Image: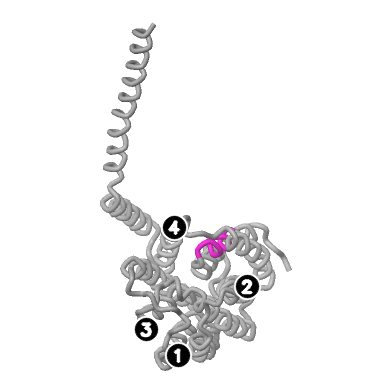
Amino acid sequence: MDINPYVVLGSAVVGLLVGLTGAGGGALMTPMLILLFNVKPSAAISSDLVAAVVMRPVGSLVHMRKGTVNYRLVGWMCAGSVPMAFLGAYLLHLVGGGEAQQQNVEIALGAALLAGTAAMLLRSWLDQRSGQARTQSVADVRVKPAATIAIGAVGGLVVGMTSVGSGSLMIVLLLFTYPALAAGRLVGTDLTQAVPLTAAAALGALLFGHVQFGLTTAVVIGSVPAVLVGSFLSSRAPDKYIRPVITFVIFASGLKYAGMGTTALGWTLCLVLLAGGGYWLARNKPWRGGWAKDKDAVPARDSGQSRSAELARRSGLAH
């Protein structure tokens, strides 16, 4: 069983981002393994799922201790997600054999990554618009069993086939189903339901034989300590900078898997960066703030010099 030190290092970077932001685990780890280390898609997905069984409980245990988990909501979601995760792993086994089937898996993974990108953008937009309307405590939620089971089923199938979506896709569906809840109040419940969901998908991967144990071990060695470090360092300040980077990487990976050529992908990403930069400039108008500060600073400096000159003049007159 060979352990690649570069996989360990890459997994540590992804684990740190997961610990800092609570998102991006499957959507970053699987593309990294495929694009950087030439791992077959089915093996990368399966190995990532098994490693996530060790990594994901770290965040959920913190929220359990804080009492921010709705266990009824978790239970209904797991009723849909756990069996569908087995089904997703079995479908991956059916389509993941030959080269043509691997391409089908890559296309499915690309679709899931693009859906995850849209989900993260939608989540950010909903958070900005939530304001005072989303004030309900997660403990006071009146659970909707049928809708919650359906959310779990959709998420379980996607996670079983691609290892992507247990966080970003599920939480957006929950926000639509429970509009009185803010996204931040759902994080603990979302992380906790992801533990049995990922475990079911990982068990399916183990049963159907896609797991590379050397690869899984390297991912665990790198990611678990980094998740712990990221969790201790996490705060609200860096999230607004790190999450857009994760979203951009997920978007780029999704386009690549969906079949976009390298040149077209490069131009598309350049246009996205330019559009994002233009939006940020139009919204924040940094030149106004900087100009105002500079304009205010000059008179202040001049007035200070004038006061010094006036004091010196008066002191001279006194003598």
Which of the marked residues, 2 or 4, is nearer the chain's N terminus? 2
x then y, percent, for residue 100: 48, 76
Question: Badge 4 is on which residue?
Answer: 245
Residue at the image point whose x is 31% and y is 37% from the top:
293
Region in magenta: 13-21
Residue at the image point whose x is 31% and y is 45% from the top:
286
Going by the picture, which residue comes out furthest to the front?
318
**Nearest to viewer (mark 1 / mark 2):** 1
Contact between marks 1 and 2 (CB within 8 A): the answer is no
Q: CA distance from mark 4 to mark 1?
A: 32 Å
Question: Badge 1 is on which residue?
Answer: 149
Which of the marked residues, 3 or 1, is nearer the chain's N terminus? 1
Q: CA distance from mark 1 to mark 2?
A: 25 Å
SS for tag 4?
Answer: helix
- Compared to 78, does 29 lie above or below? above
Contact between marks 2 and 3 (CB within 8 A): the answer is no
SS for tag 2?
Answer: helix
Which of the marked residues, 1 or 2, is nearer the chain's N terminus? 2
Q: CA distance from mark 3 to mark 1?
A: 11 Å
x then y, percent, for residue 318: 36, 9
Q: Amino acid at mark 3?
A: Thr
Contact between marks 2 and 4 (CB within 8 A): the answer is no
Q: CA distance from mark 2 to mark 3?
A: 30 Å
Q: Amino acid at mark 1?
A: Ile
Q: Is residue 42 magenta?
A: no
Question: Badge 2 is on which residue?
Answer: 51
Question: Badge 3 is on which residue?
Answer: 177
SS for tag 1?
Answer: helix
